[in-house]
């Protein structure tokens, strides 16, 4: 146990009947880190957060906050606060009373409480809203109050349980930037749960990708994106084209048996493989001699704003390529697609 960490999870486990919701999860978060638990529905993110916050009990393992074991303590005695999806404000209390709540629970004096309310509302840009009631606030403002209430306590670790998922897209983007700014300015330690990968990538110091109660990979957003530990992480984070193929004697064949011009295949053992490439790393012109090339037919083109998405078919292989600029091909045209070895991953 080390007090170097704001939070340490050591082999924590929680089952509901026959479902193993959290399966031997270990994780250490340094002070000031913003770590996101990201994963599909049912992967155990919320259960992990609830175990840390003390809303659920462990079946085994231990939880340390600032070097002290806390898993035997009730929620209110742990040095954490949680911001929920719904905000969970008290409807009959004013903004100031809502923010004061956690401070009172922790025995702060009246003058300290007033000082912290003022500070917290300033931080979330809601100074002047002290006397309003939650029903007089917008969805985004309510979440800012919930944030202020949690931060006013200055907990060892802030827990976020999908706090933006009930908001519309533009508000979500706005608040996401706001939380990032606050983290940068104040340097609090946080665990953030989301199933939105762009949110996780944009906000976090590190991202833990979860699947079936386990952490598949924990790393910086850039390493998660560029150096995924396995196919699950690769396909869960960002878009990708997956090409099923068979390698035999250093040659690659698609599933219809057509030879593919892939240089990586010379280094792959014989067998069935899936090659994964991000559509943004595929190139439609290969004059510079890409290491891997496919001749494909253009099916159709989608306009996506900054880029066009070219949907292509080559034998049994289907791909899509994102390219900026004008569209210079028509459906039915033959196009060469290329990519470098560094941009592709092979999984079996
Ligand atoms: N109180 C409970 N009783 C029974 N099963 C539960 C309970 N809470 C969670 N589970 C189960 O545990 C597993 C993990 O659930 P959890 O809510 O932690 O996942 P999640 O990754 O947060 O999902 P989501 O993104 O949908 O919120 C799921 O299979 C879920 O059905």
Image (spheres, rainbow, N blue to C red):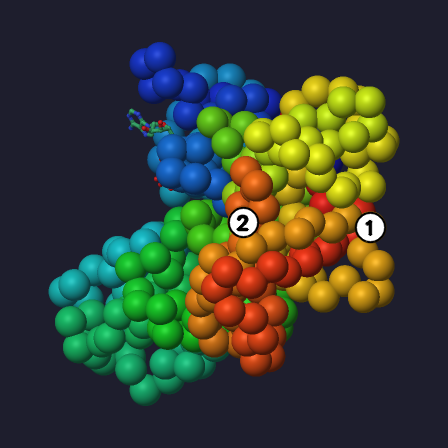
In screen coordinates, is 228 left or right of 48? Answer: right
Image spot of residue 259 (x, y percent):
71, 35
Residue at horizontal 64%, vertical 42%?
276
Q: Which residue is most to the top? A: 18
Q: Name the one closer to the observer, 312 or 215.
A: 312
Q: Name the one closer to the observer, 131 or 255.
A: 255
Image spot of residue 268 (x, y percent):
80, 28
Where residue 21 sits, quadrant-wise, is: top left
Does the CB distance between marks 2 and 1 fall below 8 Å? no
In screen coordinates, is 228 left or right of 54? Answer: right
Q: Name the one closer to the observer, 289 or 104.
A: 289
**Where 293 falls versus 271 (above or below)?**
below
The residue under label 1 is 291
Where residue 131 sits, quadrant-wise, is: bottom left
Residue at horizontal 48%, vertical 41%?
39
The residue carrying pointer 1 sits among few (fewer than 14), some (14 to 19) or many (20 or more) residues within 10 Å by Cα, namely some
The residue carrying pointer 2 sits among few (fewer than 14), some (14 to 19) or many (20 or more) residues within 10 Å by Cα, namely some
The residue under label 2 is 313
Q: Looking at the figure, which quarter contains the C terminus?
A: top right
């Amino acid at each position: 146990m080390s007090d170097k960490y704001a939070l340490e999870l050591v082999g924590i486990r929680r089952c509901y009947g026959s479902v193993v919701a959290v399966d031997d999860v270990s994780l250490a978060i340094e002070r000031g880190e913003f770590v996101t638990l990201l994963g599909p529905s049912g992967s155990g993110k919320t259960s992990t957060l609830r175990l840390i916050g003390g809303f659920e009990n462990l079946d085994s393992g231990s939880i340390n906050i600032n070097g002290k074991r806390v898993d035997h303590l009730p929620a209110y005695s742990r040095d954490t606060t949680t911001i929920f999806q719904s905000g969970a404000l008290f409807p009959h209390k004013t903004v100031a009373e809502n923010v004061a709540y956690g401070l009172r629970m922790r025995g702060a004096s009246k003058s300290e409480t007033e000082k912290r309310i003022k500070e917290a509302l300033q931080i979330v840009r809601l100074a002047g809203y002290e006397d309003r009631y939650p029903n007089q606030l917008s969805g985004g403002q309510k979440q800012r109050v919930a944030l202020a209430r949690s931060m006013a306590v200055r907990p060892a670790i802030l827990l976020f349980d999908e706090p933006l998922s009930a908001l519309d897209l533009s508000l979500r983007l706005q608040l996401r930037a706001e939380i990032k700014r606050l983290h940068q300015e104040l340097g609090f330690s946080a665990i953030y749960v989301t199933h939105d990968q762009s949110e996780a990538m944009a906000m976090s110091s590190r991202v833990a990708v979860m699947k079936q109660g386990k952490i598949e990979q924990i790393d910086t957003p850039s390493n998660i994106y560029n150096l995924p530990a396995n196919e699950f992480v690769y396909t869960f984070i960002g878009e990708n084209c997956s090409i099923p193929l068979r390698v035999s004697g250093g040659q690659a064949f698609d599933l219809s048996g057509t030879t593919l011009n892939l240089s990586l295949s010379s280094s792959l053992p014989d067998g069935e493989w899936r090659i994964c490439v991000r559509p943004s790393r595929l190139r439609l012109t290969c004059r510079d001699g890409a290491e891997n090339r496919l001749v494909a037919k253009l099916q159709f083109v989608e306009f996506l704003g900054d880029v066009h998405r070219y949907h292509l078919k080559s034998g049994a292989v289907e791909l899509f390529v994102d390219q900026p600029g004008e569209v210079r091909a028509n459906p039915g045209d033959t196009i060469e697609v290329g990519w470098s070895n560094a941009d592709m991953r092979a999984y079996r």
